Image (cartoon, rainbow, N blue to C red):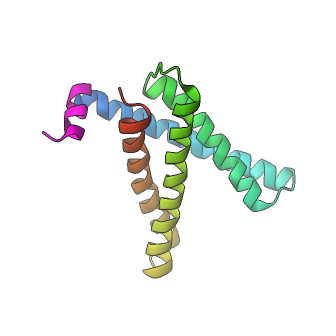
């Protein structure tokens, strides 16, 4: 059996799916935080749109880390900085992947922007979960 499947089986298929569901709920809360911070800093404080967007992304990624560490994965790893760095790097790779999928589907294949974004979100959610499950929060 491939090591990836062995780890999923060791965790239990139900537990794996439960973690994915929790990860998705946390991700949705991150979306709300990202949009809220971006809107407040851009519209109310007059920040540059790219700075506002970066702040929204960074704060959402940070809150997502805290919620996933405590609620989704129940991590007790004492090396917080190392674990947070892993999570943040995976999030940055996810952001780049999201932009790449959006560029390919919308920019090159002329698929509707929001349909492209939805596909990108689904791909990146799977990437972020699996990368964090097997790397950041490995048991």
- Picture residue at 69% right of the left edge, 53% below the top: 54
Residue 93 horizontal/vertical position (percent)? 50, 54
Q: Quadrant of residue 11?
A: top left
Quarter of the image with the C terminus in it: top left
66 above or below 127?
A: above
Quarter of the image with the N terminus in it: top left
Residue 22 horizontal/vertical position (percent)? 43, 33
Residue 95 horizontal/vertical position (percent)? 54, 56
**In this rendering, would 78 be left or right of 128?**
right
- Picture residue at 26% right of the left edge, 29% below the top: 14
Residue 40 or residue 47, whichever sits in front: 47
Give the magenta-colored segment's residue range: 1-11
Q: Is residue 5 magenta?
A: yes
Outermost residue to the right: 45
Q: Is residue 19 magenta?
A: no
Residue 11 or residue 83, whichever sits in front: 83
Residue 86 horizontal/vertical position (percent)? 51, 39
């Amino acid at each position: 059996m491939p090591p990836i499947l062995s780890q999923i089986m060791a965790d239990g298929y139900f537990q794996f799916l439960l973690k994915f569901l929790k990860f998705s709920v946390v991700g949705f809360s991150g979306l709300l935080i990202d949009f809220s911070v971006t809107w407040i800093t851009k519209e109310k404080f007059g920040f540059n749109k790219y700075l506002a967007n970066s702040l929204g992304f960074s704060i959402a990624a940070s809150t997502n880390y805290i919620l996933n560490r405590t609620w989704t994965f129940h991590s007790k790893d004492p090396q917080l900085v190392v674990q947070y760095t892993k999570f943040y790097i995976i999030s940055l790779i996810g952001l780049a992947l999201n932009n790449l999928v959006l560029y390919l589907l919308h920019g090159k294949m002329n698929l509707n922007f929001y349909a492209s974004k939805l596909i990108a979100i689904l791909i990146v959610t799977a990437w972020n979960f699996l990368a964090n499950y097997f790397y950041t929060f490995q048991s």
